[in-house]
Amino acid sequence: MRAWPILLFVVAASFAALPAQAETPDAALAKLIEDARAEASVAGACAKPEFDRLVRVFCDNRLRPGVREYYPLFGTRQGQTRSGYDVDVARAVARHLGVEPVFTRVNAASRVPLLADDRIDVILATMGHNTQRDGQVRFIRPHYYQSETIMVGPRALPVKGWPDIGGRTICVTIGNGSNAQIVSHNARLMLFDEAGVLPGQLRDETCTLAAQDDSFFDYYFIEPDFAERFDKKFGFAQVPWGMAVARVASADRLARALDLMSQIFHRDGVFLEIARANRVGTGFLERQQAVWKRPECDTATGSTNPACVLPALKADLEPTPFAGRVAAFESWVKARTGIALSLPMFKTMPAWSLFKDGIANSLILIAGALAATLLFALVLGAVQSTRIFLIRWPARAVTVILQSSPVVLTLVIAAAVAHAFFAYSSAVAIGASIVALGLMNGSNAGQAIAEAMQSLRTERSAGPQRTVELFGRAISRAATQIVSFLINAAKGTPIASFIGAPELLSALTDITAFASGRATTYSLLLVFYVAIVVVVVWLCGRLRILLERRHA
């Protein structure tokens, strides 16, 4: 009989030595939701200005997902009807929480700012999880989809890899994580707010190449006409997609709930069913379902297990040697003024290189435009002042045409003529811009010289003079108009970005395509051009005085 207590002790000790069974994600999620609902039901809890965001979801009885409206198969809208994989995932999340989804339209550029401003609770908008974005939002794991960026263009276009895109203009969307990689291979970017416009831009040949997720173009390659004209050139930057919440403490429980829900949705095939219903590729989701059925992953801590979750795409850009000092300066400004200053052009080497090249190219463009304006003014002024009818009137007709044409049209024509003789390059684009700006402004200044020449000839006091002397007096008399059009030429140089000239506006646009701080970036652009124009105005003022003194 005395052996029984000993036997019971041994059995109890054996059971105690066994590892405790891990908590399931279902149980952890149920408790999390129950606790948050209980807090929301406490009198006065929902009236607090600052409280947990999961509790607020239950207080408001709504979840605010940010979704796309112009991304076939994933997020589209016709009237009041929304459809797509992301939209249905958002509905499934809201249904699991027992609340209503209230959708807000976002795009690649607006989704993170809207989340930071607390205008949405969660991003569900085809957002790739890369290391660069980890500092902006808190990504939900496991990821709910995966894609890679592909380069799409006409079948006849000989593009097979990165060496073939240097100097080409590629259409992309603002905020696309792969933009920095494209820029680093010396390509130019043409930016759009929505991916949905890219196929149309390819069809009408506004874009020769377009870069976007393969999941986006899958929809268009189903169309026989599109598939016959275009193909995938190459792919890069394979990236997992993640839901995301704000990187603040009050969103931690909401993030935890979504982590657990994502595990369950993968394990139980919820993501898989939604993908099939929306005709979305399922290879990634089938592989993920197998992962999350594994015992070591199907636990409440599975989302933190490196063996179960996918790593973020490494997209950290090489920092500049002074990036730390720039960040410290930004923090100093914010602490003392409350202004969130952002200077991305000084923080990473790709942005810094673009910024330096943009300034150098802008200075070359401005100097060239001033020289071309003055040259064309003298040439057209002289030709229009001649007494030979067959020379004078064609010159005047050309001047009228130039004066009547929009600046953009003149730039496009100049670029088309240049590209007919030379392969596209930054130098060709800048040269075409210099010629176009010089012609536009030089024609007006030349007309002013010709009119001054005509008035001098009709003045009795002028007396008989040699043509060269008379032309010099005409230049002096037209000095004010000449200076005015020289200043216009300098002020008009930013429009050269329209034809791909890599001046500062174009460079800063490329920088903001993969970095934050658009307001600060374009404010810096304004300061640069104001300073340049001030210098040009001063120099032109000195030139005007010199010319007028000669006339006197």
Image: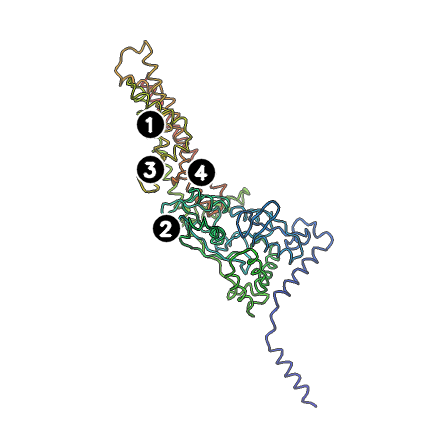
Name the foreground residue: 227 vs 423: 227
C-alpha distance separating marks 2 and 4: 34 Å
Badge 2 or badge 1: first in the primary sequence: 2
Per the image, the residue denoted by label 2 is: 159
* Mark drawn on residue 374: 1
> Please, which residue is most extreme toward the right here?
43
Badge 4 or badge 3: first in the primary sequence: 3
User: Where's residue 150, x and y in %?
Assistant: 44, 53
C-alpha distance separating marks 4 and 3: 28 Å
Quadrant location, the C terminus: top left
Kindly identify the amino acid type of the residue bearing the numbered disc 4: Leu
SS for tag 1? Answer: helix
In this picture, residue 143 sits left or right of residue 366:
right
Per the image, the residue denoted by label 3 is: 418
C-alpha distance separating marks 3 and 2: 22 Å
| Residue at horizontal 67 percent and vertical 58 percent from the top | 36
Count residues near mark 2 (Cα–Cα under 10 Å), then give few for <14, some for 14-19, many for 20+: some
User: Would you say the residues marked 2 and 4 are in contact, meaning their CB atoms lie under 8 Å apart?
Assistant: no
Kindly identify the amino acid type of the residue bearing the numbered disc 1: Leu
User: Would you say the residues marked 4 and 3 are in contact, meaning their CB atoms lie under 8 Å apart?
Assistant: no
SS for tag 4? Answer: helix
Q: Mark 2 or mark 4, which is nearer to you? A: 2
Name the foreground residue: 437 vs 78: 78
